[in-house]
Image (spheres, rainbow, N blue to C red):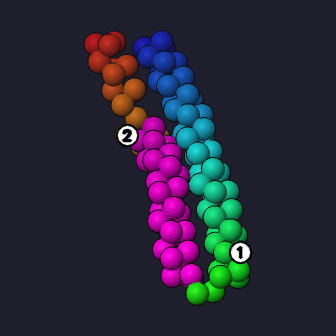
Amino acid sequence: MDNQIDGRALILACSAIGAGLAMIAGIGPGIGQGYAAGKGAEAVGRQPEAQSDVVRTMLLGAAVAETTGIYGLIVAIILLFANPLITKYIELLG
């Protein structure tokens, strides 16, 4: 029984660390979207007549970049709340 509690605690601790590492994935999209918005503002400043094309392309790129952060969030939520490793561990113990 004591071994089961230690194993569950280890799995929960590793899951919390993994969830934290998965949330680091949100840094990349944040930097990328800020950079894209800055370059988009520069492009509109240079060519105001191309504003609609620049904004459309910038928003499409931001949407694609944001999916990386959302995937990281989903992985973190699964590790914290739906943790499939604990159920597998309990099945292995019998």
Q: What element carries label 1?
A: helix
Instruction: Locate the C terminus and report the quarter of the image it occupies.
Output: top left
Position in image of residue 54 (x %, y %): 55, 74
Position in image of residue 63 (x %, y %): 47, 62
25 over 62 or under it: above or below: above
Q: Give the range drawn in magenta.
A: 50-79
Q: Is residue 39 visible?
A: yes
- Name the dominant secondary structure of the magenta segment: helix
Amino acid tagged 2 = Ala
The verdict on residue 46 being magenta is: no
Give me the residue at 59% from left, 54% from top.
Answer: 29
Q: How many labels, in total? A: 2
The verdict on residue 62 being magenta is: yes
Residue picked out by circle 2: 82
| Residue 29, disc | none
Position in image of residue 85 (x %, y %): 40, 26
Give me the residue at 54% from left, 23% from top.
Answer: 10
